[in-house]
Image (cartoon, helix red, strand yellow):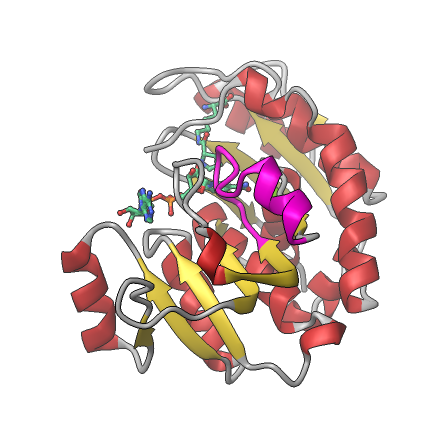
Amino acid sequence: MALLTPEDLANMTNALVENDRLITELTDYSLDGLCRKIYGTVPRNEKIAIIPVTAGNGIIGSFSESLLFTVQHFGMDGFITENTDVAGYYEAVTNGADIILMADDLAYIAHNLRNGKIAHNQICTGRIYAEILCHAKDYADDKDVLVIGLGKVGTPALETFLNEKQNVYVFDVDSKRVDEILTDYPVFKYDPAKEPKSFFKIFEATPCADTICESALKENSIVSTPGIPLGISDELIEKYKVRVVSEPLGIGTLSMLYDVFD
Ligand code: NAI
Ligand code: 2YC
Ligand code: MG
């Protein structure tokens, strides 16, 4: 499980604001507006409790604070419980929380105590980063999209692309995983050695750097990637004037909240 580090989160507040602006430029939707559209839900002053959890590798510096920044930045009412774990859960509920945000090393969830809806970060992250590409107004008529990384985030992204009628090309270093995906989904294998192909729209969700090769890029490609570290080099970003949507936690968190709103 690739865990965030406080260093990953160091620039999170700026990254959230900058990526919101870029998303608006690319799609004519703010991040908030795009979440409303894809989930069909709206916030109704829900009280959101963030519960630090000490399980596994324990509390990650700035993690809870990053969630609180996200909640408040989008005008919602949030608080971090003073207690952790079960005591924190009790504190959240007895203080009137409508929605719980909490994460251990295996799952980061949003749970709406009023309507019972529950959301998983990996699913909601894959979905929102895919929808950003599906709503890129410059490439509305180009249905080709490349998905690099077919794991717990990449697979929900792939499903989102298929639901949005995209032509999905897939790549993963794990060839067994590629075979599984080709068996389960109507997608195309991306094999640059055999059939080079470049894309205006590339999604990446891997824990590796430099996973996006030059031959996959076009001038002004858009890369939408939750992957940490960033999967494209600064050199290629500059050379191909690539627009990169990439942020460590806030975008996925807002997607989770809209998934559990009414
Ligand atoms: P995962 O381990 O389930 O999937 C990663 C996939 O990438 C695997 O199938 C693996 O074979 C593949 N892969 C690894 N190296 C590769 C390479 N060099 N080229 C192509 N494929 C490669 O991981 P998961 O949960 O899907 O997370 C992916 C990344 O997204 C991680 O870095 C994680 O930290 C990050 N993440 C970021 C979030 C955000 O909000 N920015 C939220 C959740 C996860
Ligand atoms: O501070 C805390 O409460 C910790 N228990 C939080 C642990 C989060 C572990 N998960 C991750 O770092 C990754 C993130 C990319 C989001 C989802 N999983
Ligand atoms: Mg994010």
Q: Is residue 62 above or below residue 234?
A: above
Q: Is residue 106 above or below residue 82?
A: below
Which quadrant of the figure has residue 15?
Answer: top right
Image quadrant occupied by the N terminus: top left
Q: Residue 27's spot in the image, x, y percent?
A: 77, 67
Magenta segment: does it hold 225?
yes
Res 213 seen here: yes
Q: Nearer the viewer, residue 193 or 94?
A: 193
Q: Is residue 236 above or below residue 65?
A: below
Which quadrant of the figure has residue 187?
Answer: bottom left
- Is 98 on the left-hand or right-hand side of 183? right
Q: Residue 256's spot in the image, x, y percent?
A: 58, 51
The magenta span reads: 224-240
- Ligand 3 image-quadrant field: top right
Q: Residue pushed farthest left?
A: 176
Q: Is residue 193 above or below residue 210?
A: below
Magenta segment: does it hold 235?
yes
Q: Residue 241's spot in the image, x, y percent?
A: 70, 52
Which quadrant of the figure has residue 83?
Answer: top right
Res 45 seen here: no
